[in-house]
Image (cartoon, rainbow, N blue to C red):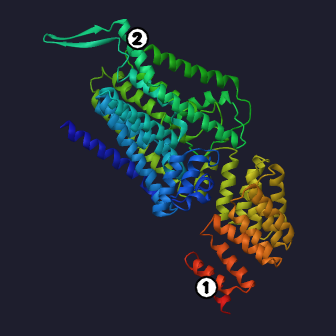
Amino acid sequence: MKKYLAISVYSVLALGALLVFWQVRSFEFINYDDNVFLTENPHFSHGLNRDDIIWAFTTPNVRNWLPLTWLSFMLDSQLFGLNPYWMHLENLFLHIANTLLLFAILKRITGSLWPSAFVSAAFALHPMHVESVAWIIERKDVLSTLFLLLTLAAYVGYVRRRSLVSYMLTVLLFALGLLAKPMLVTLPFVLLLLDYWPLDRFAASQTIKTPSGEYVKPVPVPERRRILHRVIVEKIPFLALAAVSGVITFLSQQNSGEVATYRIANVFLSYVRYIGKMFWPQNMAVFYPFENVSIPTWQIVLCVLILLIISIFAVRFGREQRYLPVGWFWFVGTLIPVIGLVQSGVQSYADRYTYIPYIGLFIVIAWGLPELLSKWLYRKIARGIAAAMVLTAMGIGTYRQVGYWKNSSTLFTHAIEVTQNNYIAHNNLGVAYGNLGRYQDAIESCKQAIKIKPDYVDAHCNLGTAYLNLGRYQDAIESCKQAIKIKPDYAEAHNNLGVAYGNLGCYQDAIESCKQAIKIKPDYAEAHNNLGFAYSNLGRYQDAIESYKQAIKIKPDYAEAHNNLGNAYLMTGDKGSALEECKILKTLDTKQANELFTLIYK
């Protein structure tokens, strides 16, 4: 009966997660990180090949060294192309796998079916976890968590049946998890927590079974020391791997030119925010701006006191209710890499950072609430009804939150509604409007971002792009120059400046701007294409051909570059080469291919 009950729980968990997240299959890429990390990166357009695999392991991608995650995207590209449908589904199936694996592990190590089921259901359905599942680039969250849970499963197997093979498997799975996302550096700490409870490896006593019954026998002090020594020594390889991963991550961040900053006050505020949003998840946004204003001292003191009181409470009652310190310090410890002690990015905090840490708080609730209600007459009915109501509310909230991730315009419109002074949301909404052809709306959104943060270079550059699309080339030049003034090595601004100059007939200025963009970013296919366009207009067709070829080398499916190359060949009288480009273009853009074909045989 218990076996069939467990199977039923697995089925309900999978079905629940599938129902609330199934809508993601029709969602688009988001113009925030999805584009920079993935769709605009030529390494993901070729599928799996030797050069790109080497790149994944040797080169940080926008300050992030996540080779296993990058390989998973390359595999997606190999099988399905850069298709958001399949990438969203893969994130969802990884989330479901994590949910089922979490339930299996907790049920095995605690022997408690319903508390384990509640933790897993809360993990699957909590609205704060939407970001990790519905955002394609957050594959690193769901993938690294899969390896974290596999590591825990292997570790439990090692503890129950100690062998070198099971130990090495545990270390290997941990290493793979670090390759997916270095946030797992705190896993050795999690293993020590599980050693305390529920694996009970620090036991000061042991239960002895005799024919007459059971009795508790104290473990001798020397034996306790030996156990403690063994448990700590076991973690040394894990700590070594975590240290290596931490160093690589730090160097990747430093090499990008971004200086680490310390925002201690925001750390305490963030911990309390995360606790509050676990109980009342509202006003969730893809980006929470960090306000560079002085945080009132009373807020900092209050947050420190809250965290201190909870920690003391967990330690004080931790001998009897050992799940308390385990759950609480799981939450505190696993958040440390992303809490802001060493800041990467400009966000104040982020929903996605709770994907692993909330498991600890769910454990405290799942095991603590039944104990609090242990003397109630109708406690089982009350717990069942309460759990059903809470999980239903979570599912409804999550389904609604998932809907905001449909596309960039929906996502950033919502972010603007629930946050204040969100300059990144205004800017990215402007980009979304531009992609929809709503250029005047794009201009207004970018201007709003600049009003909030005058030195926000991306908004100046995107404002220039919107002006370009409206044919306001002089305004575009001014915006691009302002962006370059703020950030001289901004390749996109130099490229846009070149486009504006080209449209005004200033082809030599366009050449210089495009060359500057290429100097900053050698694999910038669009800049090579625009350079070729400027050369063509000056009658330097051979130079144009070389530039178009370089653009195609970087981005083989670049239809515009193939079309331009074909036209350049025509201008040199090479109809054979132009026809070859026409054949390639036929598979990429039929309309342009037909136009080029007409020119060839005109």
Residue, disc 2: 225
In the displayed structure image, the side of residue 478 where residue 239 appears, left or right: left
Inter-mark Cα distance, 2 to 1: 80 Å
Can residue 266 be seen here? The reply is yes
Q: On residue 594, which mark appears?
A: 1
Between 293 and 596, the one lying in front of the other is 596
Q: Secondary structure at mark 2?
A: helix
Location of residue 536 (image quadrant): bottom right
Q: Residue at x 70, y 62 (%)?
A: 441
- Residue at image position (73%, 74%) is 545
Badge 2 amino acid = Arg
Residue 54 in picture, x, y percent from top left: 56, 51
* Residue 352 place in picture, x, y as percent: 53, 42
Disc 2: CA contacts within 10 A as few (<14), some (14-19) or many (>=20): few
Residue 403: percent from left, percent from top: 50, 54
| Closest to the observer, 579 or 213 | 579
- Up the image or down, 70 lies above or below 359; here it is below
Of badges 2 and 1, nearer the viewer stands 2
